[in-house]
Image (cartoon, grey):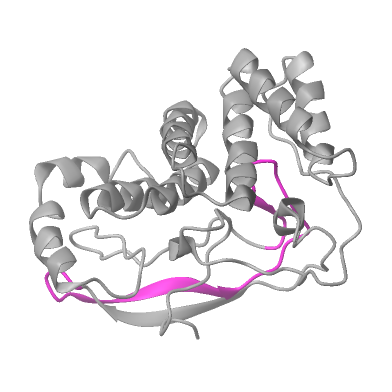
Amino acid sequence: MRVLIVLLACLTASAHATRPFQAQITCPVGGEQFTANLIGSSHYFSRGLDLRPIGGGPAPWPLPQCLTNGLVLYKDKFSERELEKLQVLVPSADYQALRVPHTQYYLAAWLQRHLDESPALIASTLLQATWQANAQQYSSYALAALEQYKLVLRQAELSPKARLRDSLVAGELERRLARYDDAQTRFSKLKQELPPDAPELLVIDLQLKLIAERNSAPHAIPAQKKPSSATPGAAQPLRDGVAPVQPTPPPGLAG
């Protein structure tokens, strides 16, 4: 299946109402019980070039976060080894200092780094942190995400489909950061490598046009007819480390 099919899975879907729900959660660090307001499902009209869902609900979906210590629960269960680390990390001055100036997904990425999660998962989380970022946060978040995607792209075992997908995201981050020369080099190379009928060329040609205009503003993925095999509105889990797109709730938390 073409990479663009993954990027455009939601593009022609009708918008469905966002389904919020509440979940009773026990914080794995400290044992605090709290009620989290979460999203059970949501469909979108389209996605941005950075894969941010457009229309239909919040993006990214909120994650459960312990009220007192601020632990962001980016997955439903931590291993015993991870819990031992979290007992030290969460109350630390470093983590607590991040709570006010930074978003949930940035905090989640910080935790993921310290828990030795996969580079792909950290890249995905940082990308979604850019969706939450305000004007002051965006550049630092996008730069952190870009560096993580570069790390992922250096992995020899990365599949061709994943390499193309992550290269498109990295190029988008470079353009948004006004690193136009880097972005142009990346997209020009991708264009040379792809066959002339590759659907990803829709994205690449738009990117090259925006780069020539020195345009660093967000833009939507160009519309394309949905292949019959695509599932409208399909969303991938945050923690799967594969598709850096809108997450589903952790198992056991869906209403």
Q: Locate the N terminus by quadrant.
A: bottom right
- Queried whether the magenta region covers residue 169, the answer comes back as no
The residue drawn where x is 34% and y is 74% is 76
Q: Is residue 24 above or below residue 55?
A: below
Query: Where in the figure is residue 70, as x and y percent of width and height?
Result: 24, 57
Closer to the camera in the image, 20 or 77: 77
Query: Where in the figure is residue 71, as x and y percent of width and height?
Result: 24, 60
- Queried whether the magenta region covers residue 32, the answer comes back as yes
Closer to the camera in the image, 248 or 133: 248
Residue 165 visible in the displayed image: yes
Residue 94 lies in what quarter of the image? top left
Q: Is residue 210 above or below residue 84?
A: above
Q: Is residue 85 left or right of residue 222?
A: left
The residue drawn where x is 85% and y is 62% is 12
The residue drawn where x is 76% and y is 72% is 231
Count of marks overlaid on the render:
0
Q: In this view, does 169 lie above or below 157?
A: above
Query: Where in the figure is residue 36, as x and y percent of width and height?
Result: 38, 73
User: Bounds of the magenta span?
Assistant: 28-56
Residue 205 lies in what quarter of the image? top right
